[in-house]
Amino acid sequence: MRSDIIVSYDVNTETPQGKRRLYKVARACKAFGQRVQYSVFECSVTEANLERLRHKLKAIIDPEQDSLRIYYLRGKREDCVEVYGLDRYVDFNGPLVV
């Protein structure tokens, strides 16, 4: 079973280590979903992949300086998310139009 989630993060980038953490968090999120804003990703993941992502992100962040949030969408994305303005979301599970 798949879960649709939103991953949001705020990484302290005042140090070189913080800048590296920011890059690593973004790269980890990109492997599981798509960026919809600078520090916000929408992901559709299996329970196993959610656990992998959660484990990976918790290993990267510094809980004394950074913030990580995972929001669970209940229902289909189009029923849970209102977007005003630019929306670059791509439904990879929908039909492919060439």
Image (cartoon, rainbow, N blue to C red):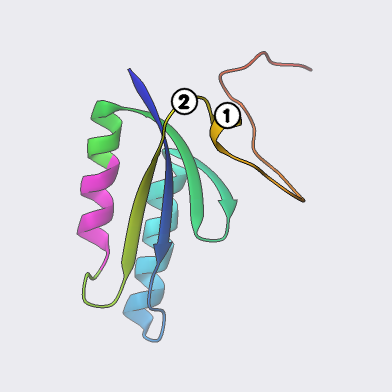
- Residue underneath mark 1: 79
Going by the image, does 84 lie left or right of 71? right
The answer to whether 94 is drawn above or below residue 66 in the figure is: above
Q: Are marks 2 and 1 in contact (CB under 8 Å)?
A: yes
The magenta stretch is: 53-61
When asked about the image quadrant of residue 25, the answer is bottom left
Secondary element at image label 1: helix
Q: Which of 32 and 76 is in front in this view?
A: 76
Q: In which quarter of the image is the N terminus?
A: top left
When asked about the image quadrant of residue 37, the answer is bottom right
The answer to whether 59 is drawn above or below residue 97 in the figure is: below
Residue placed at 24% from the left, 28% from the top?
Answer: 48
* Residue 56, magenta (yes or no): yes
Residue placed at 34% from the left, 67% from the top?
Answer: 21
Residue placed at 40% from the left, 61% from the top?
Answer: 9
Mark 1 surroundings: few (<14), some (14-19) or many (≥20) residues within 10 A: few
* Residue 46, magenta (yes or no): no
| Whole-percent x, y for residue 68 in the image | 33, 60
| Whole-percent x, y for residue 53 in the image | 29, 43
Residue placed at 37% from the left, 22% from the top?
Answer: 2
Q: Quadrant of the C terminus?
A: top right
Q: Which mark is residue 9?
A: none
Compute the Cα span from label 2 to label 1.
6 Å
- Residue underneath mark 2: 75
When asked about the image quadrant of residue 74, the answer is top left
Going by the image, does 13 lie left or right of 60? right
Secondary element at image label 2: loop
Going by the image, does 98 lie left or right of 7? right
